[in-house]
Amino acid sequence: MKVWSIAFAVAAAVTGIIAAVLWWRSTLPDQRFISAPPLGDVADDTADKSVLKGWLNDIYGHLYKTSDASKIIGGRNKWAAIYTGISVACSGISSVLGTL
């Protein structure tokens, strides 16, 4: 039983490290999606409709980039939570097997 206890303890450690790396990676900004929000002043240029359309396109582009980045971060968090659950389960099994 001690061999299985050690095997589950190692599995818990490995999956715990994987989860920690995934949590850490989810906090890093993805360079593809970094953009400054368009904060220009269009009050003076509203007579020219193309300027207003360009400004609105910039806003929509920023919102879509933010949405895409949120989806990627959500996916990383999902897998980190799954690996954390596996790590906790392996740790519990290792503990039970170690006491038998």
Image: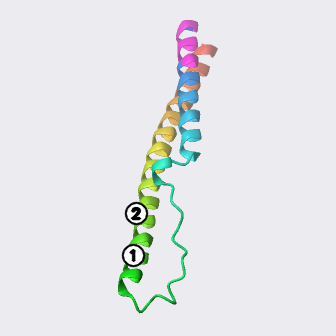
* Magenta highlight range: 2-10
Image-quadrant location for residue 46: bottom left
Query: Residue 61's x, y, as percent?
Result: 40, 66
Mark 2 residue crowding within 10 angstroms, few (<14) / some (14–19) / many (20+):
few
Give whichever of 90, 71 is nearer the camera. Answer: 71
Residue on which disc 1 sits = 54
Q: Earlier in the sequence, mark 2 or mark 1?
A: 1
In the current view of this chain or complex, which residue is farthest to the bottom?
47
Give the residue drawn at x 42%, y 53%: 71
Outermost residue on the right side: it is: 99
- In percent of width and height, residue 20 lies at 59, 34
- Image: 33 above or below 77: below
- Prevalent SS, magenta region: helix
Distance Cα–Cα, label 2 vs label 1:
15 Å
Which labelled disc corresponds to residue 83?
A: none
Above or below, comparing residue 43 to residue 24 in the picture: below
